Amino acid sequence: MEMTDRINALKAEKNALVLAHNYQRPEVQDAADFVGDSLELALRARKASEDIVVMCGVDFMAETVKLLNPSKRVLFPNLDAKCPMAAQLKPADIISAKEEFPDASVVLYVNTHADCKALADCCCTSANAAEIVGKMPSDVVLFGPDANLAFYVQRRTKKQVVAIPSHGFCRVHDLIGERDVAKAKSEHPSARIVAHPECVPAVQAMADAICSTSRMIDFAQKSEANEFIVATEVGMLHRLAKENPGKKFHAALPDATCTAMKKITLSDLYYALEDEKIEIEIPPEIAAKALPSVERMF
């Protein structure tokens, strides 16, 4: 029996739902019940009726699924799949920023850990960051941990957006530079450029569209163009090509690979289901404070 068939059999046997992020390995995406970006995954997890939810992504995603499903068993196939950007923001950073800006609202990217979410007024994803920040009651909004996304939000709201930390970034998106995009454009002159808002401002300025990975799907489907240069993690090209047959997608930087996202293998997924490990637990006192900020982003 093929590994995917064995995984499907275990899903049926154990009444399990497998979620996978767009940056996962192609074979893991294909074995999942649902593939999406952070917002899509959170929305799907929120309405899960299964007994077990397996999150194929990185650590903060598994935590978010557990926050939304406190009574369910949430499994995370590989504890080494840790998001470096999420680790850049600590609760102490938020507390310090609040001391400097006591009247500021705190909006945190969902790419943060639960102990930070517990200090936030609201969470957001790249798909709804500008909308949520724009609705905050204060003139100043503390936003973290991605400074490039903070720049993107600042340009689309009337708020003063203060990045915490000031240097926070996604290592993968920060690697994609102007020269990479220009080179890809020279090789594919008719292609439209679509960039993730975690990209540096110079790359954002070169893009025909700046959007979350879920909105990249919409952009490609609705565009009259048949060729696209994609400035995000290369795993996204699998879903783009799968859902847009007949259209071509080129990585702005072919080396833009998130090693944390690629930690989870089909074998990891299989054994997570077989052994029902590794189960995510969040201290109740943290979960109680973190959940409201997550719920407010919907």
Image: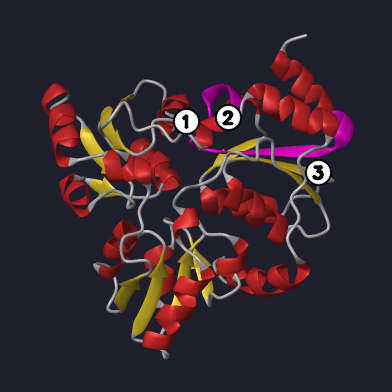
Kindly identify which numbered label has been placed on residue 239.
1
Say left or right for 266 vs 240. right
**Secondary-structure class at tag 2:** helix
Residue 282 horizontal/vertical position (percent): 73, 60
> Compared with residue 267, is residue 257 higher up or lower down, i.e. above or below?
below
Please state which of residues 151 and 91 is positioned toward the viewer in this rendering: 91
Q: What residue is disc 3 on? A: 52
**Residue count near mark 3 (Cα–Cα under 10 Å), binned few <14, some 14–19, many ≥20:** many
Say left or right for 186 vs 131. left
Q: Residue at x 17, y 24 (%)?
A: 188
Residue 208 horizontal/vertical position (percent): 21, 45
**Secondary-structure class at tag 3:** strand
Which residue type carries mark 2? Gln
Q: Residue at x 32, y 52 (%)?
A: 197
Residue 175 horizontal/vertical position (percent): 28, 40
**Residue count near mark 2 (Cα–Cα under 10 Å), binned few <14, some 14–19, many ≥20:** many
**Residue reaching furthest to the right:** 13
Work out how far the residue at label 1 is from the one at label 3, CA to CA, in angstroms. Answer: 25 Å
Kindly identify which numbered label has been placed on residue 29.
2
Magenta residues, start to end? 11-28
**Residue reaching furthest to the top:** 1
Say left or right for 73 vs 93. right
Q: Are marks 1 and 3 in contact (CB under 8 Å)?
A: no
